[in-house]
Amino acid sequence: MKITCGSCRSRFRLDSKLVKPSGSLVRCSKCRDVFKVYPPSKVNRRKHQRIDTQNLISYFSFDENGKLNSHGLGIAIDVSKGGILLETPYPIESGSLILTATDKEKNFIEVKSKLIYSKKTSSGTYLCGIEFIGIDERVKNFITKLVKEYHFRGSNLYIALKKRLTA
């Protein structure tokens, strides 16, 4: 099974046979944080396959009257046909969202979505589950461009940014 450290977001493989039914404590080999993992569910509740990414995404949150609640920047942890998992330094206000990004050709990408949940991590950031509204050709293009951009940058946003700063 694949596990992700809640603090540093490092991903690892763990033999699911080693995990107790009630959950087991594991230590991240990179940041040394200790967290609990649970055995994989027998039922896969996901409708769509998730693809890992680390793209920068801007978000704009609006209330039911269309007034801007909040805005900010986050890192897309993974994306699927139905939604995206965004890590942000602050919680996203509930309501409708507009997600924006740019691709390697500097094209502006925008998609409508809604916040499903926002959970605080042990490192103080927030993981926000976001569902796309209206799966149409624009949403499919948004997902495709995010994945292509992630792979274009060498599969790691932080390495790409470090290379730019040292160049």
Image (cartoon, helix red, strand yellow):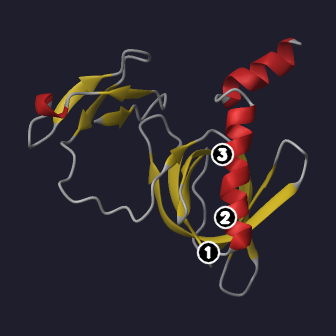
Question: Can residue 73 be seen in this snapshot?
Answer: no
Residue 102 vs residue 35, the one in the foreground? 102
From this view, report whether residue 160 is shown above or below residue 126.
above
Q: Amino acid at mark 3?
A: Val
Q: Look at the image and tell me whether residue 4 can be seen.
A: yes
Question: Where residue 115 sits in the image (x, y, percent)?
Answer: 55, 68
At a point 48% along the width and 32% down the height, the residue shown is 9
The answer for how far apart the CA atoms under marks 3 and 1 are is 17 Å
Q: Is residue 22 left or right of residue 28?
A: left
- Determine contact: label 2, label 1, CB under 8 Å: yes
Query: In x, y percent, where is residue 165?
Result: 85, 18
Residue 153 falls left or right of residue 30 = right
Q: Secondary structure at mark 2?
A: helix
Mark 1 = which residue? 135
Residue 105 placement: quadrant: top right
Judging by the rendered image, the residue that carries numbered circle 3 is: 147
Q: Quadrant of the C terminus?
A: top right
Q: Which badge, 2 or 3, comes first in the chain's sequence?
A: 2
Q: Name the amino acid, label 1.
A: Ile
> Which of the two residues, 20 or 67, is positioned nearer the viewer here?
20
Q: CA distance from mark 2 to mark 3?
A: 11 Å
**Horizontal side, residue 40 vs residue 79: left or right:** left
Residue extending farthest bottom? 65
Comparing 83 with 127, the one in front is 83
Q: Quadrant location of the N terminus?
A: top left
Disc 1, SS: loop
Tell me which residue sits at (37%, 15%) in the image: 29
Q: Relative to 156, is 81 on the left or the right?
A: left
Across and down, in percent, residue 126 comes to 52, 48
Q: Which residue is mark 2?
A: 140
Residue depicted at 73% across the width and 51% down the height: 145
Pointer 1 local density, CA inside 10 Å: few below 14, some 14–19, many at least 20: some
